[in-house]
């Protein structure tokens, strides 16, 4: 009798587990098919979670009071506001940004992410909201490096997953991985690297804030790069709504106000 009861309980348990597993598989399939729309989720929760560095002035950094601010931060807040939700920022290092988006820690990334074909294979971008060029920065007393071609065999400090790392390696540079622009400048000033390639707007802002910094720009790329807000693949209508928000900001002058505040000019054109 005990043996029969035990067998019966085992069968019932297996049936329950099978039913639970089937239900979970159905939910997963629904999500994969796009049944759960990110825009709807964000609006229902009332929050757009945004990944950013917080250490990359003037795009995303902390001011003297400790408040997160910057060009990208203001653009992202304005987009969230036009979606009818609050912006919530989660800060992380650049090289962990994409993994955080993949894992669903963020709904969107705002961090001057360059638009390129490789990233477009794995992610969705909004319309461009920044146009910039790469510049080559060396120590003030460096006379060996005058152009990008002189990077051959030299050591350049770069965030390893950035467009600028690709630029440096395309000219034959070896890379020293860093967490961000500030660390690259520190390594350059200490003589541990020969150069760094970065965004011209970032470098100009740095040199304006630190006129005593013993670095100089020796070359500028002729190719302009564009940046956009970054989303996971198949994010759905939220990308379209972000594009609409950006277009409306440009149309009503809000974009010009933010751009003039941080750069003194329109950085989209």
Image: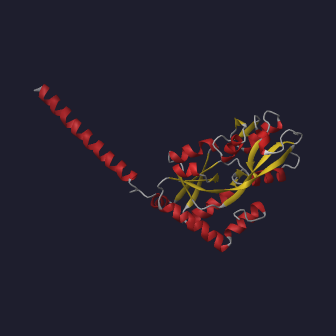
In terms of depth relative to the viewer, which is nearer, 205 or 55?
A: 205
Residue 118 location (% of width, % of height): 57, 48
Residue 265 in view of the camera:
yes
**Closest to the observer: 64 or 194?**
194
Look at 63% across and 42% down and name the residue there.
161
User: Which residue is pictured at 43% across the width and 58% down the height?
Assistant: 37
From the viewer's perspective, is residue 216 above or below residue 190? Answer: below
Residue 208 x/y as whole percent? 84, 53
For the N terminus, which image quadrant?
top left
Q: Residue furthest left?
A: 1
- The answer to whether residue 64 of the structure is visible from this angle is no
* Location of residue 205 (image quadrant): bottom right
* Picture coordinates of residue 3, whole percent (x, y): 13, 25
Give residue 78's quadrant in the image. Answer: bottom right
108 is higher (above) or lower (below) than 145: below
Colour pattern of the rendering: secondary structure
- In the rendering, at what x and y percent does residue 98 appear? 57, 46
Front residue of this view, candidates 164 and 221: 221
Q: Quadrant of the C terminus?
A: bottom right
Count of labels in the image:
0
Q: Is residue 88 above or below residue 252?
A: above
């Amino acid at each position: 009798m005990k043996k029969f009861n035990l067998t019966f309980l085992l069968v019932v348990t297996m049936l329950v587990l099978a039913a639970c597993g089937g239900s979970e598989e159905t939910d997963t399939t629904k999500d994969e098919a796009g049944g759960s729309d990110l825009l709807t989720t964000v609006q229902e929760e009332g929050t757009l979670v945004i990944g950013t560095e917080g250490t990359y002035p003037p795009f995303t950094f902390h001011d003297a009071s400790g408040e997160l601010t910057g060009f990208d931060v203001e653009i992202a807040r304005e987009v969230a506001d036009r979606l009818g939700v609050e912006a919530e920022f989660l800060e992380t290092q650049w090289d962990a940004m994409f993994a955080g988006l993949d894992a669903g820690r963020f709904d969107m990334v705002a961090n001057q992410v360059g638009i390129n074909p490789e990233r477009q294979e794995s992610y969705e971008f909004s319309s461009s909201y920044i146009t910039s060029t790469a510049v080559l920065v060396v120590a003030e007393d460096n006379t060996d490096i005058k152009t990008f071609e002189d990077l051959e065999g030299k050591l350049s400090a770069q965030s390893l997953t950035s467009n600028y790392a690709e630029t440096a390696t395309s000219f034959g540079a070896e890379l020293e991985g860093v967490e961000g622009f500030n660390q690259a400048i520190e390594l350059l000033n200490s003589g541990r690297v020969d150069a760094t390639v970065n965004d011209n707007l970032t470098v100009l802002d740095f040199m304006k804030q630190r006129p005593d910094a013993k670095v100089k720009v020796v070359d500028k790329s002729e190719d302009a790069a564009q940046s956009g807000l970054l989303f996971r693949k198949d994010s759905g209508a939220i990308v379209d709504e972000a594009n609409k928000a950006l277009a409306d900001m440009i149309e009503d002058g809000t974009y010009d106000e933010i751009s003039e505040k941080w750069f003194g000019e329109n950085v989209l054109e």
